[in-house]
Amino acid sequence: MRVTNLAGAAEALGLGRRSLVALVGGGGKTTLLFALGRNLPAPTLLTTTTRMGCDRTGGFPCLIGPTDDELASALDHDGAVLVWRTTDERKALGFAPTEVDRWFANGAADHIVVEADGARRRPFTAPAPWEPPIPAASTHVVACIGADALGYVIADRVHRPLRVAAAAGCSPYERLTPARAAAALTSPVGMTKNVPESARFTVAVAGADPDDPQVQDLVAELERRQTESVVVRPDGDPTATPP
């Protein structure tokens, strides 16, 4: 079992000198986005291809609809920045995946981390027909699931419960067991949807206690499906295993 805290997530996920990371799924995406922004070497660009709460900036300098020159200047000055296309009263709206691909191709930043899914702050979800908007050039896709989704009735706990149940092969009124969670995480109508063939796919189990039997069972189920996983302890817990 690969275990890390948030500070070690970049290493645990195997990010190299240059990466375009798309975060999909449920609980922990925004927290992981900001953790990678703090711990990846500069320059690092943080953004979304969906929407984020305007109140969630992680303490990073935030640019709204910058030109390429403005973006380059901010990255040179600050090292890591959060970029949105526009905002309304409550939500920040992100960029098209093709724009993120263009930044990566042009070398706008060594690392680009994209929140490429929405879950309305629920610990798990499954994509609608138009989701998730993953950039085609993504080098890594990380599917997030909050450990607090495991063992609960799907309809009571997750975003888009009917789609989660379909991906898991069960009723939305059944519990999300580790086996069902693994099925949804690896399903082509679940978390592997729209993942580029060249991207490295990893499941991140967020806010997890590696001694929890349900977490251990989920990791084992994913291993049986030949799927990488990382157990992310809550921040501040120093216990971790090497990647």
Image (cartoon, rainbow, N blue to C red):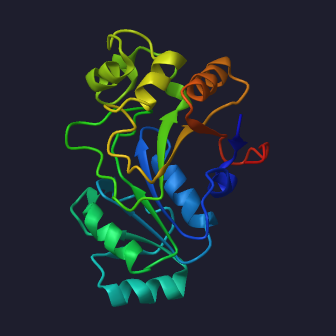
| Residue 171 image point, x, y percent | 32, 10
Residue 242, horizontal then vertical, whole percent: 78, 47
Picture quarter with the N terminus: top right
- Counting the numbered discs, the total is 0
In the displayed structure, 146 sits above or below 6; it is above
Task: State the residue in front, 140 or 64.
Answer: 140
* Residue at the image point whose x is 79% and y is 42% from the top: 239
Q: Could you say which quadrant of the image residue 46 lies in?
A: bottom left
Q: Pinpoint residue 210: horizontal percent, then vertical percent.
A: 70, 30
Residue projecting furthest to the front: 197
Q: Is residue 169 above or below residue 229?
A: above
Q: Is residue 24 left or right of residue 178?
A: left
Q: Which residue occupies 28% across, 70% down?
A: 99
Name the residue at 38% across, 62% down.
137
- Residue 52 at what x, y percent from top left? 34, 55
Q: Is residue 226 above or below residue 171?
A: below
**Residue 137 seen by the camera:** yes
Using the rendered image of the protein, determine whether residue 84 is visible from the camera's viewpoint. no
Question: In the rendered image of this protein, does residue 163 appear above or below residue 70?
Answer: above
